[in-house]
Amino acid sequence: RSGRNDVAGAARGMSRGMAIVARGGSGGEGSGSVVLESTASTAGGGGSIYGNPKVYELAFGYRDFPAEVSFLQKLAEKHGTGHMRSLLELGAGPAWHSTAAAAAAARTYAVAVDNSAPMLQRARERVTEMGLTDVVAVVQGDITALDNAALRTAAATLHTAGKHSSGDEGFDVACLLLGTAAHLLETDDAISCLQGAAAALAPGGIMVLELEHPFDLFEGTLLDAHGDAWESEVDGVKVLVEWGRAGDPFDVTTHIVTRTVGFNVVDPTSGEPVEGWQAIEEQVRCRVFTAPEIDLLARLAGLRVVAGYGDMNFDTPLNDEQAHNMIIVLKKE
């Protein structure tokens, strides 16, 4: 199960699956009660990846967000309210899924929540650039202490198909993707996050979690961390990503792995650093959840597990050898 295994998670790091990539919400600059457990290297001068949207988008923006939004829509049809006319994106970062959802369907509106000031600024820029200010709202908030009244107020400012939407009915779909839930290191924070999402959902609404697949946990791979590295070219530059390093510690009592991550932007031909881009190196603490843990946390939050998949599609079962991530669908009755 070695190697990057193509593109499915925010980055297919580690030995088989998904590198956990938080998108604000539970940490980053301006974070609330949950602090992203990240220590940026001062030597590189580039700060944290979570406070640098430009590097973040270069490193992790290769995913097919319209296809993933289509998957969310189909999940809502199969397991939820029967449609996805409203989306709540938690830990939204650049609001990739919110903007893709609103752009794909004229009757869909979205509220994107994050707690990182640079990411919020980038999300608002994206919404404006795409001409979606009437259907996508960007809200600052801590995913462990969601303000449901603020979310409904944000939804009420949006117009869908020419009609003012009150948002009173709740959201059809809430999502916490790209492994952002891994930064809910404390169980109380995980419960609070799910409780807040449950309160925001409409009756019959669903919450979709994208998590690191626990295969590495049970195989013992995390105890012998070796990391992963990959590169991609975007807009005439090459971004080099290191996700995990040999010797990175894993705590068997908390299921928290501390990963060394690094990002460098170089010239594709010479390999020299590109002017204006600073190297980033930091250590990020991530919690690896198991499916039974999520089931129990969901029950404590008033949700129940209705489905599980091994990737952001219907083709890969959760227990498949080629499963990249752990996608869990929770439902509000």
Image: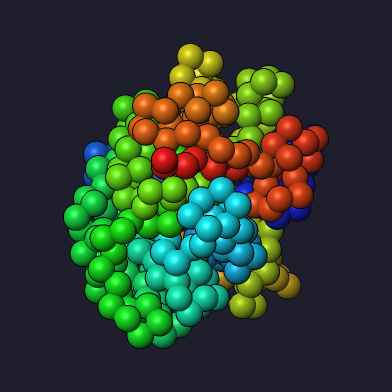
Residue 134: image location, x then y, percent: 33, 80
- Residue 93, quarter of the rendered image: bottom left
In which quadrant of the rendered image does the N terminus lie? Answer: top right
Spot the residue most to the top: 253
Left-right relation of 296 to 17:
left
Can residue 87 be seen?
yes
Residue name at image x 67 percent, y 20 percent:
218
Up the image or down, 193 lies above or below 127; here it is: above
Percent x, y of residue 133: 34, 80
Residue 37 shows up from this direction: no
Image: 207 above or below 226: below
Color encoding of the figure? rainbow
| Residue at screen point 51% across, 51% down | 80
Q: Is residue 209 above or below residue 88?
A: above
Above or below — where is 212 with respect to 22?
Answer: above
Q: Is residue 16 left or right of residue 30?
A: right
On the rendered structure, is 199 left or right of 238? Answer: left
Pick the front one: 52 or 134: 134
Tell me what residue is drawn at x 28 percent, y 78 percent: 164
| 180 and 227: which is toward the camera | 180
Q: Position of residue 28 (x, y in %)?
A: 34, 49
Of residue 232 and residue 162, the one placed in the foreground of this image is: 162
Give the number of callouts: 0
Q: In which quarter of the image is residue 157?
A: bottom left
Query: Which residue is depicted at the point 61% across and 58% down?
Result: 74
Q: In this view, does 132 lie to the left or right of 317?
A: left
User: Which quadrant is the C terminus positioned in?
Assistant: top left
310 or 35, nearer to the observer: 310
